[in-house]
Image (cartoon, rainbow, N blue to C red):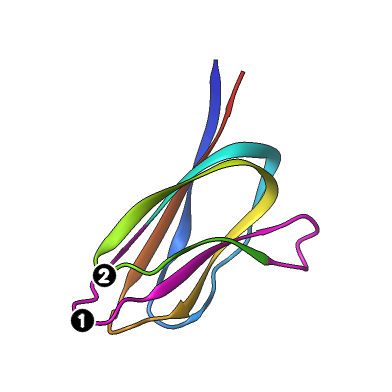
Amino acid sequence: MTNYIEFDLGTFTAIGNGDAKDLMNAYIYYTWQQSNNATESAPEIALQGSVDGNNWYDIDVSSVIGGEMRHIINRPIRRLRASVKSMGDATSIDVKCIGAVIQ
């Protein structure tokens, strides 16, 4: 049985941190994607995790023009957010994620 949650981590038009998502469960498998309209200079987007909601750490980073999908395994995390560290030449970045537990 697979238990999963899908969530939108935000649409960004400037650098900054997105709203934190409290997942209620510590999922151990994540697939996240970023899509952007950059053409020459890649943005830098981090997926960040926190145990307490105050201290945030990069779990994974994507720096690809146009976007990509990435996978994280065996990292149980209670809270997630996206953090755009650089826009590159993008004017819009969308970040989405799925967390799963396979029982």
Asked if 55 appears above or below 50 in the picture, the reply is below
Give amino acid for label 1.
Glu
Gap between marks 2 and 1 measured at Cα: 7 Å
Asked if 90 appears above or below 21 in the picture, the reply is below
Q: Position of residue 24 (x, y in %)?
A: 71, 41
Q: Quadrant of the N terminus?
A: top right
The residue at the point 68 percent across, 53 percent down is 79
Q: Are marks 2 and 1 in contact (CB under 8 Å)?
A: yes
Nearer to me, 21 or 75: 75
The residue at the point 63 percent across, 61 percent down is 20
Q: Is residue 57 magenta?
A: no
Q: Quadrant of residue 42?
A: bottom left
Element class at badge 2: loop
Q: Position of residue 90 (x, y in %)?
A: 28, 79
Q: Which mark is residue 73?
A: none
Q: Looking at this rendering, what residue extends furthest in the top direction?
A: 1
The residue at the point 24 percent across, 65 percent down is 66
Q: Point out the stretch of residues depicted in magenta.
A: 34-56
Residue highlighted by disc 1: 40
The residue at the point 42 percent across, 74 percent down is 44
Q: Looking at this rendering, what residue extends furthest in the left direction?
A: 39
Residue highlighted by disc 2: 65
Asked if 53 appears above or below 15 in the picture, the reply is above
